[in-house]
Amino acid sequence: MKSTRLLRAIGDIDEGYVTEATSPRRRSVWMAVGAIAACVAVTLSVVTATHLNQKPNLIDPSDEPISPTQSPTQTKPQPDPPLPIINVIPSTEGAMGYEGYIAPTFDDMNFPTPWRETDKIQTLPVYDNSVMAERYNVTHDLTPTEAEKQAMAADLIYMAKKLGIPDPQPVWNGDYLPCYSLAYGDYVLTADDTKLRVFLPMPEGCSLETTDSYDTLEASAYRILETYRDVIGLKNPRLAISYGDYTINGEQMWMNVQFYEQGDIPAETLRNYCFNSVHLLVWNDSSLQISFDRLDLSTVIGEYALISVEEAKAALLEGYYVTSAADPFPGLDHIEQVEITYRNAFWDNVFLPYYKFYVEEADPLPGAAQMGMKSYATYYVPAVQRQYIQGLPLWDGSINS
Amino acid sequence: MEDKRIIDLYWARDQQAIRETQQRYGAYCHSIAYRILDSHEDSEECVSDTCLRAWNTIPPQRPTRLAAFLGAITRRLALDRYEQRTAQKRGGAQTALLLDELQECIPNGENVAEDILLKDLLDRFLSSLPTVTRRTFVLRYWYAYSLQEIGRMQGMRKDAVATSLYRTREKLKEFLEKEGVTV
């Protein structure tokens, strides 16, 4: 039978696809775009680019730390006019994929967060991202404006100068991939709407392989920081390694290795962690990719008072939450960890703080139970008071119905 | 024990390699075989045979992804066993379903692709797919997961999984037709 032969042939496909399929995490589309952009950049010859001298929108050339006047908690809640209603528009394109984790126990994993309940953060800002969300979800045209292009180029030039690249001339890849790129010797740089990426030689003795141990990752991260401290550019860097999730192949992996700036106050540190982190990745099997967030936070909708953890738990019990899990919230005794974080995918129309609950699933993910493991899903409750929010895509049992 | 160390044990011809493989990947390989065979007894034998096959192939091979390497061996052994059982008219229902679905992908024609070319074509085809679509396809036709299970793993409705797979099968057929080969 011919289909038997095809079924057998599928068994010989590239092992990378086999591994990819069992990873329960979703990956950013932009990771792939940036990776391709880097390939493009390698082959570029130097061409003349538009002269650009606008101040970078991500990296301050003065290297000054964030001014206290820019700190989110320094912006006092304004009683008049009242805070606007936040209209959450569900993505039609990007927000697919199960966000969950597999492990023998929750303690086998590590989900670092600078947030502590005892910090008692009272308010956090909500940011508008409607321009980018509309491009991605509605018009499907990711072409940036001239001003955005100039900001991208300026960020890239700023980084190129840090690396000692003489007279950097970014090349615009607008026809296919909306990003600037630049190749010089061992270095490749790309900048798009959401990320600045720098591809560099991996320092000797460092490894960021997917199955490396926590200790190896930690040692490598600090070695990379030491080698590229100026590129990473943080005054008071803090390391965060998300680690320990298993694939259904039984491989334990790390999820994220990032540095972020310790702020003067907890709310500032949290904002730095969520929006201004420096991510370390292995690239092309052996090179290093250092990736900087460059989401646009220039439009603040308002500074909103936060609900408490207990109020968020009550919301969970009521069914007021967002999740990609297949089943409803199974109960408070299933909660393993809680933190405040922003949901900040570039396709979201607002960047809103949420309580994120890591919850053991009553019915483990297929594959997990067979491995003798448990699965943990995430449930999000807006940290902003409910009367300010409309349009939240609550769990309605539709997944897999 | 980490994969690198297990592979080192194989290369040192240390039988501890087999015990470590059983411990780390026994359940995983069993689940692959079970989805094809629907029999714990047969699946357990596939796992034992997988370890033996690994012992005989490492060295000279040095797998970069041990899980996928072992899984591929188990899958082949399970399909062998499935075919033997089908001849005895007691095959697994799930596998029969997969075969029916894949039959839709096969173009008419006389130019049958050789094994190496077929693998290359499948890799090229998969590389052209969006990640979610590719994962869905591989979960179904490599791992033999049910639509319901894939839905949970991908955060998709069951009918969306079925639609995605249907479209991918159509695309695969078109792709093979363009390449001028059949299976």
Image: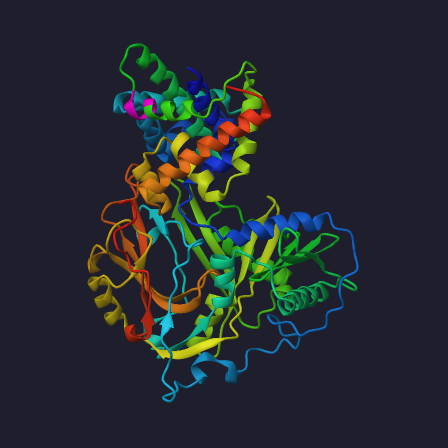
Place of residue A332 in the rendered image (x, y in percent of width and height, measured from the top left): 21, 60
Is residue B61 something one can see in this rendering?
Answer: no
| SS majority, magenta | helix
Q: Is residue A291 above or below residue A275?
A: above
Q: Which residues are magenta?
A: B92-96
Would you identify the image quadrant in which residue B26 lies? Answer: top left
Q: Is residue A65 left or right of residue A126?
A: right
Would you identify the image quadrant in which residue A198 lies? Answer: bottom right
Give the residue at the far bottom of this rendering.
A80
The quarter of the image holding the C terminus of chain A is: top left
Q: Is residue B93 above or below residue A237?
A: above
**Nearest the eye: B178 or B16:** B178
Place of residue A322 in the rendered image (x, y in percent of width and height, measured from the top left): 31, 60
Q: Is residue B168 above or below residue A31?
A: above
Is residue A126 something one can see in this rendering?
Answer: yes
Q: Is residue A81 left or right of residue A259?
A: left
**Nearest the eye: A128 or A183:** A128
What residue appears at the point 45 percent right and 19 percent down from the top-left corner? A5
Q: Is residue A275 left or right of residue B50?
A: right
Place of residue B72 in the rendered image (x, y in percent of width and height, measured from the top left): 44, 27
Q: Is residue B112 above or below residue B172?
A: above
